[in-house]
Image (tube, grey):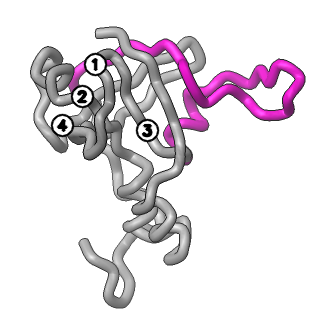
């Protein structure tokens, strides 16, 4: 399935930054892909399933979630973070900032489970 990738910041990502980028709260917030419910049905995925996002610059595996806000069919949203950085091209078109919006992607069901990553074990009263 093909889609258009949009990126941006989220509230849960902001809360995770306050705890530190090595916190499990932050990590979980940047390894998800919000998708339209109809697109999820068409692709045959349920919330929490892994999907591979493929661009001309690379691919990553993230967990799909149903969008909390309206996301049109054919559009996916992934928060800024290490997953996005791995699949965005280096070209800045003279702005000094790569394009993080309107990127053509291919989606494939499955992929290797996303590891928690180093430093993402809960500390104190972080929620699991």
Q: Residue furthest front?
A: 70
Tell me if label 2 and label 4 are in contact, CB under 8 Å: no
Q: Residue at x 22, y 22 (%)?
A: 109
Q: Residue at x 44, y 17 (%)?
A: 4
Q: What residue sits right under mark 4 in the picture?
A: 49
Q: Is residue 78 at least partly visible in the picture? A: yes
* Sequence-first tag of 2 and 1: 2
Tell me if label 2 and label 1 are in contact, CB under 8 Å: yes
* Marks 1 and 3, how far apart at CA: 15 Å
Position of 126 relative to 76 (above/below): below
Q: Which numbered circle lies on residue 73?
A: 1
Q: What residue sits right under mark 3 in the picture?
A: 78
Other-residue count near label 2 (Cα within 10 Å), few / some / many at <14 / 14–19 / ≥20: many
Q: Which numbered circle lies on residue 36?
A: 2
* Sequence-first tag of 3 and 2: 2
Q: Residue at x 40, y 62 (%)?
A: 12
| Residue 123 within the segment the image draws in magenta | no
């Amino acid at each position: 399935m093909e889609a258009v990738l949009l990126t941006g910041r989220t509230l849960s990502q902001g809360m995770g930054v306050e705890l530190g980028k090595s916190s499990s709260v932050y990590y979980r917030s940047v390894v998800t892909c919000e998708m339209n419910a109809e697109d999820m049905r068409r692709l045959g995925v349920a919330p929490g399933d892994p999907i591979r996002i493929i661009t001309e610059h690379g691919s990553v595996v993230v967990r799909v979630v149903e969008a909390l806000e309206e996301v049109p069919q054919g559009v996916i949203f992934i928060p800024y973070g290490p997953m996005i950085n791995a699949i965005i091209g280096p070209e800045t078109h003279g702005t000094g900032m790569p394009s993080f919006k309107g990127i053509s992607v291919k989606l494939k069901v499955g992929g290797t489970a996303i590891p928690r990553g180093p430093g993402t074990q809960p500390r104190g009263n972080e929620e699991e």
